[in-house]
Amino acid sequence: MKVTVVGAGAVGASCAEYIAIKDFASEVVLLDIKEGYAEGKAMDLMQTASLNGFDTKITGSTSDYSKTANSNICVITSGIPRKPGMTREELIGINAGIVKSVSSSLIEHSPNTIIIVVSNPMDTMTYLVHKTTGLPKNRIIGMGGALDSARFKYRLAEALGAPISDVDGMVIGGHSDKGMVPLTRLATRNSVPVSEFISEERLDKVMQDTKVGGATLTGLLGTSAWYAPGAAVSGLVQAIACDQKKIYPCSTLLEGEYGLNDLCIGVPVVLGKNGIESIVKINLSDAEKAHLEESAAGVSKTNGLLEL
């Protein structure tokens, strides 16, 4: 199992670290355009191997895509990160060119790879990879929903005063502050609806805090977060690499599912050795359907800014 992570910045390095620590991959390749940067990150991470008890080999490369050859899974984190006050959509002009070039180079050396897109605006970048590579839809996955759901569960546990292992919940829709659709109605604490424990007003605050989760961290850190995004990617990679058949909300190309067409947006999917094994249909309330459709309209508008 060989995994490539393009972009050795904070998010990419965190991806590589969490994947290596889980010890299911034989090799992780970090690639970056900055001379020596990926090599340095890889060396630093390899020096933790005996301390963290993993045997995954981590190598770094400066723009040499031949080192990524025959990768089973490729993760694209490259592009400029958000700065305070910046929306994910404002990144589109710069990051579209980067993602298009990177995905083409990856497929040249690993034609059978599965691609996970992290670069923002994530739903639109996932759509771009679909439109420019010709890969089947099951092999192109956008990461956002897994991260948004983790942030949702963090806020739920905080509101409930419960251990996070007791909490389950999911966020669908676009990976944007306005586009997220946290499914509060379906959220549970050990199978009991969370509405049994907290007020509707408190639950609404959980939803709002979840939707601005990334912006909150950007304001505090001065740049995008990296630990949780890295962990979210590692979960998706492991589900695919180990054929776990786990359900994650991921950005995927919809062709009539949920009444939506010709866009990538977050919905629950089953992840296994083929990438997206199936799209899971859940019954949404009228309000949830309306929020998802509104989110889809926003994603489509951003897609319209692409120069395809």
Image: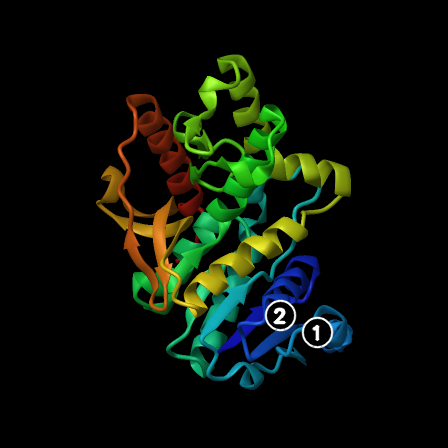
Residue lying at 63% horizontally and 74% vertically, measured from the top left: 31
**Residue 241: x %, y % from top left:** 44, 69
Residue lying at 28% horizontally and 55% vertically, measured from the top left: 278
**Residue 138: x %, y % from top left:** 32, 62
The earlier-in-sequence mark between 2 and 1 is 2
Residue 118 in view here: no
**Residue 307: x %, y % from top left:** 43, 55
Which element type, helix, strand or loop, lies under badge 2?
helix
Give the number of callouts.
Answer: 2
Disc nearest the viewer among 2 and 1: 2
- Label annotation for residue 92: none
Residue 4 sits in which quadrant? bottom right
Which residue is more in the foreground, 12 or 235? 235
Residue lying at 34% horizontally and 47% vertically, measured from the top left: 263
* Residue on which disc 2 sits: 20
Name the residue type under label 1.
Answer: Ala
Q: Are there few (<14), some (14-19), or many (20+) residues within 10 Å of tag 1?
A: many
Cα distance in 3D space between marks 2 and 1 = 15 Å
Residue lying at 26% horizontally and 39% vertically, measured from the top left: 258
**Residue 246: x %, y % from top left:** 39, 55
Which element type, helix, strand or loop, lies under badge 1?
helix
